[in-house]
Image: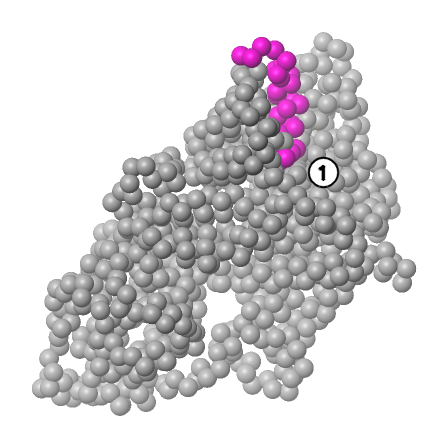
Amino acid sequence: MRNIRKYPLLFLLLATAAIFTLIGIMGGDTLYASYSAQGSPVPSLARVFQGIHDGIYPWEILHSNITTEDTSSDSPQAQSSPGNDTVPPSGNLSSEHTQEDLSSAGSSTDDNFQQEEEVQQEVLPRSFTQVDESYFEDALFIGDSRTVGMMEYGGFSDNTVFFAKTSLSIYDLFYEPVSLTMADGTSKTLEELLCERSFGKIYIMLGINELGRGTTESFSEEYRSVLERIRELAPDSVLFLQAIMRVGQEKDASDPIFNNTNIQARNEALSQLADSHAIFWLDPNEVVCSPEGYLIPDYTSDQVHLKAQYYQLWKDYLMTRGIT
Amino acid sequence: MTFLQNLLTPNSLVFGSLEFLFWFLPAFLAVYYIVPISYRNGVLLIGSLFLYGCAQPRYVLLLCLCTAVNYWLGLRLGRAASLRRRMFLALAAALDILLLAVCKAAVLAGAMTALPVGISFFTFKLISYQADVFYGTIPPENSFIRFGAYVCFFPQITSGPIMRYADASSGLGRPKAAAASFEEGLRLLILGLASKVLLADRIGLLWNQLSVIGYESISSPLAWLGAFAYSLQLYLDFAGYSLMAGGIGLMLGYPYIENFRHPYASRSIGEFWRRWHITLGSWFRDYVYIPLGGGRGSGALTARNLLLVWLLTGLWHGGTANFLLWGLVLGVLIMLEKFFLGKVLRRRRLLSHLYVLAVVPLTWVLFAITDLRQLGLYFTRLFPFFGTGSAVVDPGDFQRYLSMYGWLLLAGCLCCLPILSDLYRRFRRQTWFLFILLALFWLSVYQISNVSGNPFLYFQF
């Protein structure tokens, strides 16, 4: 006891560390099941702090022993975003959109054939035309930090709306409020935004942050349901699905996750989601990558983002691919 | 066995890593204080080599060999007759400098991906030891264990401070910390950790962001904000590291080695460098500048010595041309101050502070950007005399980054004020301060857990 008075800070640290470690160990199979030793080995108390970051607080350990059903999910985000399952599986939804949706890979070839015939009669696939800057006046851009760069340096008018945020992913697209660059400047969720305003066209580029998560299949399934949801909320908008921008050669060679092989696999899967009628596939990589498929060295300094002055290339590319 | 696996990462030598804070340090301290006093230096040597080996398995033998050769040379130097002493000193210094130079050249030539961790620091420690033995300020160390514990001392192996042997010997003699200094060490460890993790690393994102944008596209106000932010980051990072190193040293029973004394409150560049990385500046003063004659000769001789010292300082920090330029600029500035600018600065208080706060960030820009073309580009943004060029520039970028980083930068600026030390000394034993420290520690752990614990969270685009 005399020592506690001599070493107050040491004892406080040891006591709190013991408490956090205990919580981390106790919740190892329940509260923190999804944080188990993935990647670098971390002490069990680190899970407690990773949990706090994702909205799982240590005191929940008191309840978690009773309710264990929510531990089966495969990711921290899935736990922290309640209502993840409110997005219906794509199979159900596509039936509502049989008329428009040509991409539903789930349906049989016979169905596809029938659908195609129906569509052929009603609407022909639309083709791209050259448009000018005014085309973006009623456009919405959805994306991660790359789209943030487009917002800052693309030279768009104030009427163009950007729903873009660093680290935004398809998994949190409908749960993450984003501060918008509109006159009122408030934060809104995508659903709120799409409900209160309509857009002539919606551009979306997401997918680099998701590379470390799930498989190409699970990713494109999730992307499909996100697109369905957007179509539901904005049925009259032209939807431009953009390929994930590739990375530079150094990054490609050194990164086991964020490399062009993985990006290419996912882009191929994504391109299947477009139908050239309601959802259009765009690949800006055509104008920012070398023939070998790397982001051109002069265009980037961190191998992932375009330098400010090269966003214009991307924008110019979009202007060659207007749908009117 | 899992304990070992947890430590076998390059990260474990980093004080701000979970591996170090929660595996190595507690385990090491426990062993260090459980074994009898006479074994503690041995524990320190083995623990230091073990940690270095975990992080740098390829170079731990190099460290051992270098230590052993210098131990032997030191002993020979101490016992040699006066004529041969000079020869042994030259041999030892040449070997250490050669090792450092070869490694640096190999990295520059691309033959090695990175320098062996800490080589710039332990070679300088060894040279200071040999020189001190040569001048007779210290006797040569007879015990290999004590000598090894001094050289491989894990709190200082990665980035200093460059502790002199005379300062270490009190720790090596009685390796036990009094309760008061153990607690003080913990306090400094936490403050240093918070400085690095909560401020430096986060402010550092601003500087990174500028290169992502491309220097040609940043507005001039943002270029200046970037230079100030980088200056703060560098200070909070290195001074934070040094506080941690000093704190761990105190916890092991070693004296506190001061490496930073509120440098940004200086009134000249010369003073700045007597208060920034103090152990490096004093190393160059004692082992290069003074042996060359220092400032005692003619004006031309002093100028030559100053320029030489500062070119070497530049080379020590890095081999690319920008570091030479950086050293040269500092040398010229300090020379000007010595000959006439200093008189002006001493008389004008406000002017001298403004001078330091404007010039030092510019020198840090020279230090930070290794590509000369990019460096030139950055300076045209700092001083846009020739217009903005043709590149895309967002005129609102300064406002945006200020709103994003304003609070962090303000907190960083407050940490540069000398009054902070006085407040610290006054309140450090208060109970409420204890809880502030506790909160800072766990906030830092929160930050580290979420940045390094989750490999994907770190890579967010």
Measured along the vertical axis of the image, is residue B267 above or below residue A316? above
Quadrant housing the C terminus of chain B: bottom left
Measured along the vertical axis of the image, is residue B454 above or below residue B31? below
Amino acid type indicated by mark 1: Ile
What residue is pinned by disc 1?
A: B257
- Please state the horizontal and vertical placement of residue A11, each as a whole percent of the image: 79, 61
The chain holding disc 1 is B
Q: Quadrant of residue A218?
A: bottom left
Q: Which residue is depicted at the point 57% across and 31% down?
A: B348
- Please state the horizontal and vertical placement of residue B317, each as a whole percent of the image: 53, 33
Query: A176 or B102, which lies in front?
Result: A176
> Residue most toward the right?
A2
The magenta region covers B275-300
Q: Which residue is depicted at the point 45% across and 47% down?
A: B225
Q: Which residue is depicted at the point 68% across and 13% down?
A: B86
Measured along the vertical axis of the image, is residue B247 above or below residue A82? above
- Please state the horizontal and vertical placement of residue A298, each as a whole percent of the image: 30, 46
Query: B120 or B294, which lies in front?
Result: B294
**A82 sits to left or right of A308:** right
**B109 sits to left or right of B252:** left
Query: A294 or B427, which lies in front?
Result: B427
> Was residue B133 drawn as part of the magenta stretch in this picture?
no
> Was residue B276 drawn as part of the magenta stretch in this picture?
yes
Q: Which residue is depicted at the point 64% across and 52% down?
A: B193
Secondary structure under the numbered disc 1 in the rendered image: loop
